Amino acid sequence: MMMCLSLTAWLHSLGPMPYWCFLLVLLVGVLMAGQLYRYWKTIYDLRSKNEFIESERQRSEALTRSLLAVKAELQASNQDLRAENQRLEHRIAEYAEVQRERDRLQQRIVELTSAGPRLHGVWNSSHTFWHISRNGAQPMMQIGGRINLASSNTHEVLHLLAGYIEGQRMDLVEPISIRPDVIEDEQVILRISPPINANESCSLTAEIVLEDHQNRFHNLPKHSFRPTELAPPWLSEDPADVAF
């Protein structure tokens, strides 16, 4: 409005002018006013958008800080859960070990309280072995060695006729007789063909089970038998024992 009044006063100062000149000046003024309005409107819209963007930016930063805090809490919770999981796994392992020990002790109690005879043995580690030989064209496995054997809870002589490893029956090279109340230094040698699966360059850890003349089973101590390429020199050379 002030601009229009100034323009009118300026026109009056010029004196009389043609009508079309007046209209032209008025049109130019209207156009200029429209341009100014659009300029002002653009600036207003830009300021509004800028304020909105700034508000959104601040809200996003606040949300980011909140998410980072939640992430840190989740990471801490995850670490706590991992630690708790490790503790539980350790407890489970301890419980499993206790269960195995309990089962072993229960088995031992059954063995000690059983009415039948019991066989006890101690392997001579320097005189135990296993190796692969041949029985004709077939490979054959020999395993065993010298062991001190004694019986208890019986007054009869135990005649040991066969042996087992992991449930697989093996023939004894020769039967063994264990007298009551006597510690016998015996040679327990088992033969089987075909051999059980084993690495010929590594020791074979096994628990030999012996069967007596009344089909009773007696567990010998678990032992690691050393691999050898040939039968040891102290092994019996009785022709009935040689299978090459």
Image (tube, grey):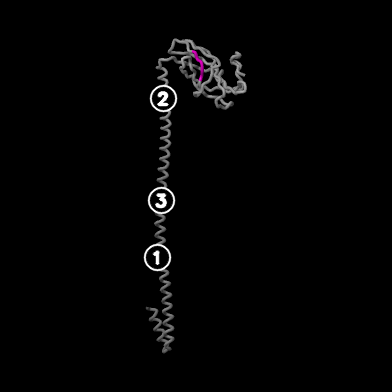
* Horizontal and vertical percent position of residue 50: 42, 63
Q: Quadrant of residue 54?
A: bottom left
For marks 3 and 2 on the same chain, the one whose residue lies earlier in the sequence: 3
Instruction: Measure the C-alpha gap from mark 3 to mark 2.
Output: 52 Å
Quarter that holds the C terminus: top right
Magenta segment: 159-163
Magenta-span inclusion, residue 160:
yes
Q: Amino acid at mark 3?
A: Leu
Residues marked 3 and 2 touching at CB (< 8 Å): no
Q: Secondary structure at mark 3?
A: helix
Q: Secondary structure at mark 2?
A: helix
Task: Give the crowd class for mark 2: few <14, some 14-19, many >=20 residues within 10 Å.
Answer: few
In this orientation, which residue lies closer to the viewer: 167 or 101? 167
Which residue is the site of mark 3?
A: 67
Task: Give the crowd class for mark 3: few <14, some 14-19, many >=20 residues within 10 Å.
Answer: few
* Horizontal and vertical percent position of residue 75: 42, 44
Task: Report whether 47 appears left or right of 195.
Answer: left
Instruction: Measure the C-alpha gap from mark 1 to mark 3.
Output: 28 Å
Which residue is the site of mark 2?
A: 103
Which residue is the site of mark 1?
A: 48
Q: Amino acid at mark 1?
A: Ser
Q: Residue at x 56, y 24 (%)?
A: 195
Q: Residue at x 41, y 61 (%)?
A: 53
Q: Quadrant of residue 114?
A: top left
